[in-house]
Image (cartoon, rainbow, N blue to C red):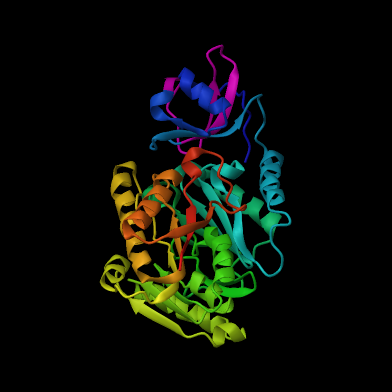
């Protein structure tokens, strides 16, 4: 996994002044329309060198001829040699950023967070001894064997699972013979027939569907919010809307909730939550907490149930704006959800509303929720707002997708 940045045969690019400034400012994306000159055609994953207006080395990155993001910069500044040691040092730097964040009670977390760790378009998650590598750019496909080797050296994974973003699956199969699934060292801690890995999070046991599940199999980015919800759950009836595999519910049960209710349209998700509760029956608070499941569209159910029945409502929908054109509709949807959640709350109850839509800013999301509060006619107090957990560093504007607000209804 190497390349001399100054090789005569190297793919060479010159870009607009605005793109130069963005690269120097730390943004790793170089868009196709920003390229002014290119010495020849390039292939997926080829190392491309960017020169500035004075013909000096500016950056080196991975080229993708079929993506609007034509180059994902790996290094900006003085020329470097991207050899095995350089890559290993970059991987170890990501590991060092997480040193001290987790103990033996948490064995599920993000090891590489794409652009935030200097690996644009690539994430690596740990679930116990099983690791999941997800690629969002075809530019990484030619480097896959080298990456797998580096991960094996650094983490000693018993199993490594490859996941591919939907937009690169066709080229991965056609040009590189790659598809999703186990790629290295199948171990005993993964159920290969179901693609399930088990891991710990704050002492709770969870399963992750690492082959077919959403993202890499679990929503690791909500860990800190799950912990906060646990601290608020004692003595409360809890509603977990868009419950997925029941993470917020399980934490609430351990936190002493009077009851927990999962609400999701997917029977597969509700069954996953049941299995996660079954994994934690040794916790007396979990085994003693009534756990209910409702299969329904969360929007419709929240609007149709007008009697306040809960003391803690968690609204954690999937992304409602996957592209910029969906932003306005997503903001309206978040307001609608908040209105439904507020109707479920008893006096003194807590509303927890989250968004993972990168195209909706924190101000837009928090504003939509708070406008719903005003329209409800009820009085609420702000408790907290939260963003990304430390193992998901967000270093560019496009990476700031996660936001959550906590509001308490006054008596």
User: Measured along the vertical axis of the image, is residue 262 above or below residue 326?
Assistant: below
- Answer with the quarter of the image where residue 285 lies: bottom right
User: Measured along the vertical axis of the image, is residue 407 above or below residue 286?
Assistant: above
Residue in the picture at 61% in, 86% down: 284
Spot occupied by residue 192 in the image (x, y as percentages of width and height): 51, 73
Spot occupied by residue 52 in the image (x, y as percentages of width and height): 54, 17
> Could you tell me which quadrant the C terminus lies in?
bottom left
- Answer with the quarter of the image where residue 339 lies: bottom left
Residue in the picture at 46% in, 72% down: 245
Q: Per the image, is 39 magenta?
A: yes
- Residues 264 and 310: in front is 310
Count of all numbered marks drawn on residues in the image? 0
- Answer with the quarter of the image where residue 226 lies: bottom right
Q: Give the side of residue 157 with respect to residue 384, left or right.
A: right
Camera sees residue 27: yes
Camera sees residue 183: no
- Residues 211 and 125: in front is 125
Spot occupied by residue 319 in the image (x, y as percentages of width and height): 38, 55
User: Measured along the vertical axis of the image, is residue 324 above or below residue 161?
Assistant: above
Residue in the picture at 55% in, 49% down: 144
Spot occupied by residue 137 in the image (x, y as percentages of width and height): 46, 44
| Highlighted magenta segment, given as a residue range | 35-63
- Residues 307 and 333: in front is 307
């Amino acid at each position: 996994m190497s390349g001399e940045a100054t090789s005569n045969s190297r793919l060479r690019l010159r870009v607009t002044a605005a793109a130069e400034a963005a690269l120097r400012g730390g943004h790793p994306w170089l868009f196709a329309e920003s390229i002014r000159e290119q010495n020849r055609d390039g292939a997926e994953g080829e190392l491309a060198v960017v020169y500035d207006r004075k013909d000096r080395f500016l950056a080196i990155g991975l080229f993708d001829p079929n993506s609007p993001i034509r180059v994902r910069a790996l290094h900006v500044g003085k020329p470097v040699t991207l050899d095995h040691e350089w890559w290993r040092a970059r991987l170890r730097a990501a590991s060092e950023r997480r040193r001290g964040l987790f103990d033996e009670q948490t064995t599920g977390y993000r090891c590489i967070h794409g652009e935030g760790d200097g690996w644009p378009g690539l994430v690596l998650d740990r679930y116990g001894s099983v690791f999941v590598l997800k690629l969002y750019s075809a530019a990484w496909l030619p480097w896959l064997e080298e990456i797998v080797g580096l991960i094996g050296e650094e983490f000693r994974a018993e199993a490594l699972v490859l996941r591919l973003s939907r937009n690169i699956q066709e080229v991965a199969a056609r040009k590189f013979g790659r598809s999703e699934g186990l790629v290295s060292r199948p171990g005993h801690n993964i159920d290969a027939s179901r693609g399930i890995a088990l891991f710990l999070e704050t002492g709770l046991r969870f399963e992750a569907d690492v082959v077919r599940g959403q993202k890499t199999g679990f929503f690791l980015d909500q860990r800190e919010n799950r912990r906060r919800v646990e601290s608020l759950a004692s003595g409360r009836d809890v509603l977990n809307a868009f419950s997925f595999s029941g993470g917020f519910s399980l934490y609430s049960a351990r936190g002493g909730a009077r009851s927990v209710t999962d609400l999701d349209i997917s029977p597969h998700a509700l069954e996953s939550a049941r299995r996660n509760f079954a994994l934690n029956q040794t916790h007396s608070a979990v085994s003693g907490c009534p756990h209910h499941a409702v299969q329904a569209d969360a929007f419709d159910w929240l609007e149709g149930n007008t009697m306040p029945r809960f003391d803690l409502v968690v609204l954690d929908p999937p992304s409602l704006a996957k592209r910029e054109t969906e932003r306005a509709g997503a903001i309206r949807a978040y307001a609608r959800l908040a209105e439904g959640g507020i109707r479920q709350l008893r006096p003194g109850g807590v509303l927890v509303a989250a968004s993972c839509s990168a195209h909706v800013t924190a101000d837009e999301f928090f504003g939509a929720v708070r406008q719903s509060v005003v329209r409800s006619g009820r009085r609420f107090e702000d408790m907290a707002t939260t963003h990304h957990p430390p193992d998901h560093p967000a270093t560019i504007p496009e990476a700031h997708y996660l936001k959550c607000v906590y509001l308490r209804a006054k008596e």
